[in-house]
Image: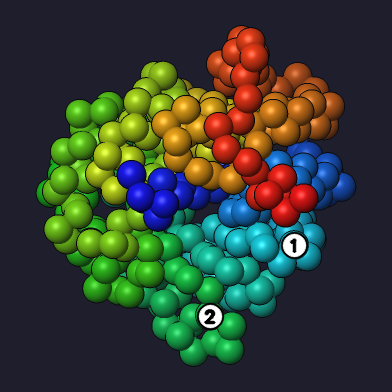
């Protein structure tokens, strides 16, 4: 494995995907502290918020303030999720580096999640592309395909449907393509088949995977995705997350578990797993009663564990 091959981006999405699925509302100050702790641990990609009406997701009512704080870190790439053109306008005004627009391959999930059909969301995606192209500040545009591997509302998602939507968002001008296992249906064999089918269509733009751990398959699915060239993965501290419109779907893969596995395989994320584990205390304090997940936190680091390579701040020192 060459130096470029072993670099992996781990994007912390807990501030958006993690918080949107729980009834508790984390204070703005605690969200800022979470960003501080994540950055101190080496996180350099962060999905900070979504621009949606506060009446629908009160957890995101302070999106502008949270993103403004994240933007104070010059080396942090900040992403915002936007479900529509109005949200994209706010994200561009906030100065984010990347915008992800969710497009459900499952028609049933799309209607429940954004009140639009899948094709209507593709049309909205094209309008967001045009808006970015006409703006002075032009964030990268990610097509976040959700329910790619199955849906609790619809059931099986045919590969032909996935291929069709991929072609459409590529034609609409996506910069990057993210595949999300929104409901935790994905299995390693399925991930391999989908990536094999989509790589010839999307090429290098097929870059990001987002796995939920509902059935304990997230790390195994990550291994398969690595073998098929994916080098960016979403995760949440403490395994928070889910989807308000995906009944029974538990949280994302825990950031600390993912980083620990990547370390063991000599992939370099630049993230200090010990600092991630310490950051879980912030969530326990600010979200009392919320269940945190992750096997590493439960079992602890192996006796005598040392990081497999120096972290950036250690090299600088």
Residue 15 seen by the camera? no
Read off the residue under disc 1: 73
Residue 267 position within the rendered picture, expressed as x and y whole percent measured from the top left: 45, 40
- Up-down: is 163 above or below 33? below
Read off the residue under disc 2: 138
Residue 12 position within the rendered picture, expressed as x and y whole percent measured from the top left: 59, 45
N-terminal-most mark, 1 or 2:
1
The residue under the point 66% across, 74% down is 95
Residue 195 seen by the camera? yes
The residue under the point 57% across, 38% down is 309
Residue 295 image-quadrant placement: top right
- Label 2 element class: loop
Residue 99 position within the rendered picture, expressed as x and y whole percent measured from the top left: 52, 65
Q: CA distance from mark 1 to mark 2?
A: 19 Å
- Up-down: is 179 above or below 260? below
The residue under the point 53% across, 44% down is 269
Q: Total of numbered circles in the picture?
A: 2
- Up-down: is 132 above or below 97? below
- Label 1 element class: loop
In the rendered structure, the answer to whether residue 276 lies left or right of residue 154 reads right
Residue 64 position within the rendered picture, expressed as x and y whole percent measured from the top left: 74, 63
In the rendered structure, the answer to whether residue 303 lies left or right of residue 251 reads right
């Amino acid at each position: 494995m060459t130096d470029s091959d072993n670099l992996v981006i781990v994007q912390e999405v807990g501030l958006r995907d993690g918080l949107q699925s729980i009834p508790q509302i984390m204070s703005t100050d605690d969200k800022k502290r979470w960003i501080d702790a994540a950055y101190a641990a080496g996180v350099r990609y962060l999905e900070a918020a979504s621009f949606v009406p506060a009446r629908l997701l009160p957890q995101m009512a302070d999106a502008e303030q949270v993103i403004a704080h994240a933007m104070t870190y010059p080396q942090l790439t900040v992403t915002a999720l936007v479900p529509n053109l109005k949200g994209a306008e706010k994200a561009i005004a906030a100065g984010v580096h990347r915008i992800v627009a969710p497009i459900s391959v499952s028609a049933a999930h799309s209607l429940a999640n954004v009140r639009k059909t899948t094709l209507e969301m593709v049309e909205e995606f094209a309008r967001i592309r045009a808006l970015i192209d006409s703006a002075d500040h032009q964030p990268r545009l990610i097509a976040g395909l959700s329910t790619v591997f199955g849906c609790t509302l619809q059931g099986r998602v045919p590969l032909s449907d996935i291929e069709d939507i991929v072609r459409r968002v590529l034609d609409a001008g996506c910069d990057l393509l993210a595949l999300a296992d929104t409901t935790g249906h994905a299995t390693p064999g399925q991930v391999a088949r989908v990536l094999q089918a989509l790589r010839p269509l999307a090429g290098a733009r097929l870059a990001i995977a987002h796995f939920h751990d509902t059935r304990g398959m997230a790390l195994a699915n990550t291994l398969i995705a690595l073998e098929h060239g994916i080098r960016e993965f979403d995760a949440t501290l403490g395994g928070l997350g889910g989807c308000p419109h995906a009944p029974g779907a538990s949280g994302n893969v825990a950031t600390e578990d993912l980083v620990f596995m990547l370390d063991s395989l000599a992939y370099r994320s630049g993230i200090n797993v010990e600092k991630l584990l310490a950051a879980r205390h912030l969530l326990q304090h600010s979200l009392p009663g919320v269940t945190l997940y992750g096997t590493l936190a439960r079992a602890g680091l192996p006796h005598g564990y040392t990081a497999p390579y120096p972290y950036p701040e250690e090299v600088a020192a």
